[in-house]
Amino acid sequence: MEYYSDSLTSYKRLITREVSIGDLLLGNGHPIRIQTMTTTDTMDIEATVAQSIRCIEAGAELVRITAPSKKEAEQLKFIKEALRRQGYNTPLVADIHFTPNAAEIAARIVEKVRVNPGNYVDKKKFEQIDYTDAEYAEEIERIRDRFTPLVKICREYGTAMRIGTNHGSLSDRIMSRYGDTPIGMVESAMEFLRISRDENYHNIVLSMKSSNPLVMVQAYRLLIQTMQQEFGEIYPLHLGVTEAGDGEDGRIKSAIGIGTLLEDGIGDTIRVSLTEDPEFEVPVCRDLVKRYQASTEELPPASAGLVPAIPAAGPGYTPFEYKRRESFAVDLIGGGQVPVVVADFSNVEKIEAADLVAIGYTYDAVTDKWSIGDAAADFIFTGHQLLDFALPGSLKVICYPATWILAEDKEKYFPIFQDSGFVEAGQKSDRLNFVMVDCFNEENPLNGFTWLEELKKDKTVVLCLSSTNRHAMQSVRRMMMELLQRQLLNPVILITDSKWTTVDEHLIHFATETGALLLEGLGDGICLGISAATPLENVQVSGRTYLPVTNMYQFMNNTAFSILQATRTRISKTEYISCPSCGRTLFDLQETTAKIRSVTHHLKGVKIAIMGCIVNGPGEMADADFGYVGSGPGKITLYKGKEVVKRNVASEVAVDELILLLKENDAWVEPS
């Protein structure tokens, strides 16, 4: 394996070592398992059992329960017994952070324990210490002495273990040598994995979680490469994005991180971490996983034999580091400018000025002026339609060539051609032309792209890449490799259509297909579409309508900007890093997140972390600008970056104090 996957141009599941979690088999080609984590107080046996049952009945195949101290670990016995009495045999996972003694108790009770190498033995004090090689080796031996007893217990009891690295809780020792990097995350886990292997213990799953999907994806890829090079085998992988948040943003961020890896065949079990009740996480997991389990009758044609392998010279970019593909600028597309958003209105029979509200433009007839939102689309695709009203100053129109010829305003209207039709066209724009390419289907094999060379020097052409193949992302990625190999610097817009049904399914499809490419620096814009024949259904969970959508075009526009935000390629709104609630949470996380969001959502580009306890505190919130962290019952600690600014603030006034902190640091603007 030269990179991190057997193929970057087609879908193939990565085969990992098989492990057993009770009677549940993981890895080695077994189905991708779905899990979640309870949010109840572990000391409340009745509530924890009831919530576990709701999660299991929703489809969870593993249920994780926090055990921050010995007393919670001891309660796991009674929780497990109560579930088994009621006929629920789903494996339980104990979540351990700072307390090795709790892990050693839990490992004798439940089927799996999760330890975080960043805080299981080490204590994070945010200190920069320069270790000599000898001192570093002494630290490893200290870890070995403290960690080995747990390994031996797990081996004796047949208990599985997840070595779960978190980007935000790397130890001071790892940080001092490797920094806050994916490589540091990998080494943090590898230290514990090497100790386990020395004890002939292999019932292990690993994870590399971060609230930043880019960091998360790079860390998993590096971990796979490292295990393959060092051991010649790969242990099963648990996928997740930490502190993803709630609603659409939480789902999109999770789908970008998890979906990018699933697209490459990576991942043996997943958890979507939402700031919502855990049973709401499970349907999102199911929507992610079913994309790779659907029957062939439900899927587009396969691309086998049509998509070439990676070029002999390599992909043309490194999948372990982010570097945006170089392109020249055509109008406001490419050349290092932020990615553009194209709104597809080609299915609207008669486009009216009022329709543009859905994509960020509002017309005031009294003042005869347009107001433009931060999430306003840059282009609108109208197909065969010319608009009969004056457009906002920044919005431009894409239409078919025959329609474009009829347009009087060639400064506002631009044509879109079908692949080689551009080269053959008699009339073209002298400013901006779009060229659609369906990548590697029977009509467009590799040897059929000879006309690409004619675009090389044409500084008016923007390519619009899509694929009707089953594994569309891989087909588009292979075309990107072709552009890199041929040194075509034309900007590229990623076109993604969805034929799924529910809002969640569409969100996951769009985020996975486009996010995977944007994380690799590939793409200068996105255009999302929903098949005209496909209904848009709201999601029903436990009888509750979730993520309600009334306007398809507003939904697609918001989704496009959310994808760009989550991939950190275009910032248009406030970003919230919000942990999923658990038994350690010291306040109502969902209510508090909603309250903070309601008063800060207008702060474009500011990252605010909302953490339920110190475990998910200054470390887990990683690169947030400001933090709101539970520090005791009814008490909040406020952070600027990783620095404590105010301690033990009463929760009743903590949101007001957060706003004051934002003002003191020039991060506040009054809402308009």
Image (tube, rainbow, N blue to C red):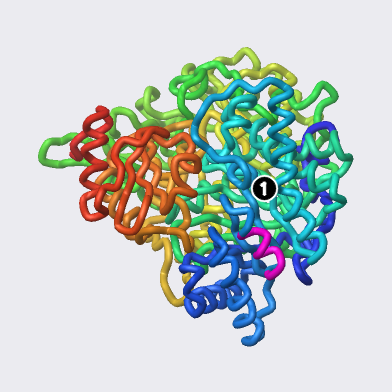
Residue at 42% x, 61% y: name it: 547
Closest to the observer: 578 or 394? Answer: 578
Residue 361: % across, % down = 29, 40
Q: Main secondary structure of the magenta part?
A: helix
**Camera-side residue: 564 or 655?**
655
Look at the image and say whether residue 28 sits in the magenta stretch: no
- Which of 401/6 is in front? 6
The answer to whether residue 258 is left or right of residue 625 is: right
Q: Residue at x 72, y 60 (%)?
A: 32
Q: Is residue 635 above or below residue 323?
A: below
Report whether 388 appears left or right of 367: right
Amino acid on which the number 1 mark rests in the picture: Ser
What residue is drawn where x is 63% and y is 57%?
101
Q: Residue 104 lies in magenta, yes or no? A: yes
Q: Quadrant of the N terminus?
A: top right
Residue 541 percent coordinates (x, y): 48, 71
Residue 454, x across and y down, in percent: 68, 18
Image quarter of residue 644: top left
Nearer-the-camera pick, 416 or 467: 467
Look at mark 1 in the image and give the residue it sits on: 207
Q: Is residue 17 left or right of residue 386?
A: right
Q: From this viewpoint, is residue 318 visible?
A: yes
Left or right: 6 with respect to 384?
Answer: right
Q: Where are the magenta residues, as a range?
A: 102-109
Specify the farthest residue to the left.
366
